[in-house]
Image (cartoon, grey):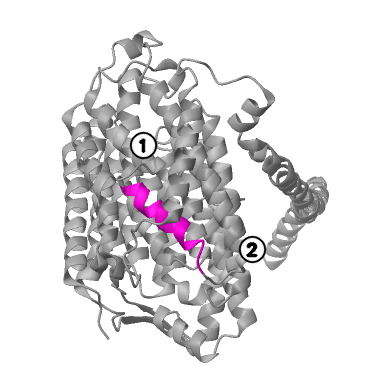
Amino acid sequence: MSVDALGAALPGVPVAAGLVGLLLRYRMRGFAALLGVGGATVALVCAIAVAVRGVRGADAGVTIAEFGRVTVTFGTWLDGPAGLVAVAVGVVALCVQVYSVAYLHDDERYAPYAAQVSLFTGAMLLVVVSGDLIALLVGWEVMGICSYLLIGHDRRLPEAPRAAVKAFLVTRVGDIGFLLGIVVLGLHAHSFRIAEVFAAARSGGISGGTLTAACVLLLAGVAGKSAQFPLHTWLPDAMAGPTPISALIHAATMVAAGVYVVARLYPLFERSTAAMVVLAVMASVTMLLGALSALGQDDIKRVLAWSTVSQLGYMTGALAVGAPSAALFHLLTHAAFKALLFLAAGSVIHAVGTNLMSAMGGLRGRMPVTFWTMTIGLGALAGVPPLAGFWSKDAILEATTGSGPVPRGVAWIVLGSAGVTVALTAAYVVRLWRRTFFGPPRTAAAEAGHEPPWAMRGPLLVLAVPAALLGLAGLLTGFSERLGAGEPLAHLGWMTLVALVLLAAGALLAWRRDPAAAPPDTALGRLLANAFYLDAVQDALVTRPVAALARLARRGDEGLVDGAVEGVGSGAGGLGGLLARAHTAALPRAATAVLAGGVVLAAVIVIALGVGR
C-alpha cells in the first residue's frame, strides 16, 4: 500500500500552510502573506510537475479504517484531467494570494484570511487528486466551511454574515444527498475507492436502480456546490465576501468542484439515463436563468456572479449530453477568464469605491491595464474568436448535436438553451463593458479613478494570457487526449457560424442602448433584477415553513419535555419544603424535650450520688 508523494503534496502543502497560518496573531501580516503566497507557489509547482509527468492511474493508497467488508483508504488518482485542473487551481490561487496582499492592505484580519484561502485551495486540490470517495468528501466539506468563513470575512458589512450563513445552509442541503450517494456506492461496492466502485458498476455489483439513486443523490450535492437550479440562490449573495474570494470561488474552487466530480465519476453517471436527464434539465434551466438575471443587475460583481451560474450550466449541459471532455475544457478556460474578470472588477471597485456600474463610466483612459485585461476576459466570456471561451463554448455546442446518453429531444433542449444563452451572454457582456468603461464619468470617484498597485495589476496580466490563448490548446491532440477526447476539442463547424450570429445579435442589441441609461423600471426589469424572485419563492415555500416548524418544535420542547422535567424538579422541591417546614416547626419542642431530659438526667445523677454516700 502506497500513496503518490507528489499527489499527496498537492493538497498537503497548502493545507499545512493554512493550519500554521491560523495560529498566527493578527499583527503578523508579513509572515501570513509569506505562508499564503509560498504555499500557493509550492502547490502550483507540484501541479505543474504532475501535469508534465504524465497520466498516472490510481495508486494503491493506504488503509485508514475497516468496517466489516468496507475499507476506507486514502489514495490519489492523477489522470490527465486531474493534472490540468490542479494547474488551473494553482495558478488562480497564487494570483488571488498575491492580489489580496494589496487589496486587503488595511485589513487587520488579513492573517486568518490568507490561512483560510490556503485551506480552501488545499481542499479543492484534495477533491481533484483523490482516488477515494471518503477523502473526496473531506475536501468537499472543508471547502464548505472555508467558503462560510471567507464570505463572512468582512464583519463590518451587515450582509456578509447573512450571505455566509445562506451559502453554508443551501450547500448543506445538497450535501446531505451527496453524502448519502457516497454511502450507497460504498456499501454496494464494498469499497470507497473510486476504481473499485467503477469495477463494481461494470460487473453488475451495483444494480441499475441503486446506481440511479446514488447518482441522483450525488447531483443534489453538485447542484448545491456548483450553484445549479434550484440550489443556485446562494452564489450571487456570496458577493458580500472580498472580491479576491469571489474570484477563487467562481473560477477554481467550490463551484468548479461539482462539475469536476461528475466528470470524475462519469462512468457511473453515463450508466443512468434518468440521472443524465435530470442533469440536462437542471443545466438548461440554469444557463438561461443565470444569463437573464445577469442582464438586470447594476452591481458589477452580481453580473459576474450570475454569469458564473450560467456558465456552469454550460458545463453541466456538456456532461449531460455525453461530453465530459468538453465540460472540462470549458472549466479550464472559464477558470482563467472568470478569475481575470473578478480581479479586474476588484480593481475597478478599488478605484471607484462602489460596486454599482451606474456610478462608474469613463474609466477606459484612466485605467488602461484594467480596461484591456477586462476586455480580454469579457471577450472570452462572450465567446469572441479567437479567445479562450470561443473554442470551449463551441465544443459544447457541437457536442449537443451528437449522440449521447440522453434522448435526442433532451439534447435539443440543451442546445436550444445554450444557443439563446450565447446571445444573452453577449448582451450582458457588452452592457457591463460600456457602463463601466465608456461614456462620461458618472461620479466624482469615477472621474478620479486610477490604476491599482502592481500587486493587483500583475495578476491581471498573468491571467490575461490563458484567457486569450488557452482555447488554442484545444487544437492540440495531446491536450485533448489529456481531457479524455479522442480528437481535438477545438474545431470549426456549422455550429460555429450559428454561435457567431447569435453573439453578434446579442451584442448589437446591447450596444444600441445608452451606457449611462439606468436599468428600466419596468415589470420585466424588476423581474430580471430580482432573478425572477426565486429567493422570495424559496423563502415562502421553504425558509418560513421550516422556521415556523422549528419555533413549534421549540415551544413543544420547552412546554412538554422541559415542562415535565422542571415539573418533577419543582414537585420534589415543594415536597422537600413541606418537610423542611415541618421539621423547622418541631425544633422548639424538640429542644425543650432535650433540655428537660437533660435536667431530669442531672437530677437523677445527683440523687444517686447522694444515696451512695
| Residue 367 visible somewhere in the drawing | yes
Residue, far top: 444
x%, y% of residue 315? 46, 56
Q: Is residue 595 above or below residue 484?
A: above
| Magenta residues (range) | 388-402
Lateral position of residue 594 relative to residue 413, left or right: right
Query: Which residue is labeled 2 in the image?
Result: 409
SS assignment at label 2:
helix
Identify the disc placed on residue 378: 1
Q: Residues within 10 Å of mark 2 (few under 14, many from 20)?
A: few
Main SS of the magenta part reads helix
x%, y% of residue 283? 56, 55
Q: Is residue 400 magenta?
A: yes
Q: Is residue 444 magenta?
A: no
Q: Quadrant of the N terminus?
A: bottom left
Residue 210: quarter of image: bottom right
The residue type indicated by label 1 comes to: Leu
Q: Nearer the viewer, residue 562 or 204?
A: 204
The residue type indicated by label 2 comes to: Gly
Q: Quadrant of the C terminus?
A: bottom right
Q: Residues within 10 Å of mark 1 (few under 14, many from 20)?
A: many
Q: Nearer the viewer, residue 422 or 7?
A: 422
Q: Nearer the viewer, residue 307 or 215?
A: 307
| Residue 155 visible somewhere in the drawing | no
Query: Which residue is at a point 21% across and 57% down the rendered structure image?
Result: 43
Query: Which residue is at a point 32% across and 10% down the rendered structure image?
Result: 447
Lateral position of residue 537 relative to residue 453, left or right: right
Query: Which residue is at a point 46% across and 72% down the rendered structure image?
Result: 266
